[in-house]
Image (cartoon, rainbow, N blue to C red):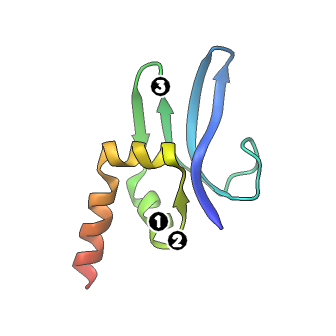
Amino acid sequence: MVKLRLKRCGRKQRAVYRIVAIDSRSRREGKDLQKVGFYDPMKNQTYLNVPVILYFLEKGAQPTETVQNLFKKAEVFNELLSNQMRFN
């Protein structure tokens, strides 16, 4: 199963996170399938590659709770619903 989750980067006390698509059995710092975004909690910046995120969500990837909250703030799920409505 593929999960969309945070991968810690940066230095000590200055964590930044990559949002990655990764196999659920892999460890946090393991090999990711693809990088789909970036999150800096210190500056409260978020960059999301929305088309790639929508691709993984349509294929059945499960976001973690924290990543799901980031997606809700960025309204990614609204775009997912509008894409599904367009194709139906």
Q: Residue at label 3?
A: 41
SS at mark 1 in the image: helix
Of the residues shown, which amino acid type is indicated by label 3? Answer: Pro
SS category of the residue bearing label 3:
loop
- Image position of 49 with respect to 59: above or below: above
Q: Which residue is mark 1?
A: 57
Q: Is residue 53 above or below residue 67?
A: below
Q: Which residue is mark 2?
A: 60
Badge 2 density bin: few <14, some 14–19, many ≥20, Cα 10 Å? few
Task: Tell me the kind of residue under disc 1.
Answer: Leu
> Quick check: 59 left or right of 9?
left
Q: Looking at the image, which residue is at 60% across and 58% down? A: 3
Residue at the bottom extreme of this rendering:
88
Q: Quadrant of the N terminus?
A: bottom right
Give the class, few, some or many, for how many residues have Cα within 10 Å of label 1's Cα (few <14, many ≥20): some
Residue 37: x percent and y percent?
49, 44
Residue extending farthest front: 65
Q: Quadrant of the C terminus?
A: bottom left
Query: At 65% across and 33% down in the image, what residue appears?
Result: 8
Answer with mark 1 or mark 3, whichever residue precedes in sequence: 3
Up the image or down, 9 lies above or below 3; here it is above
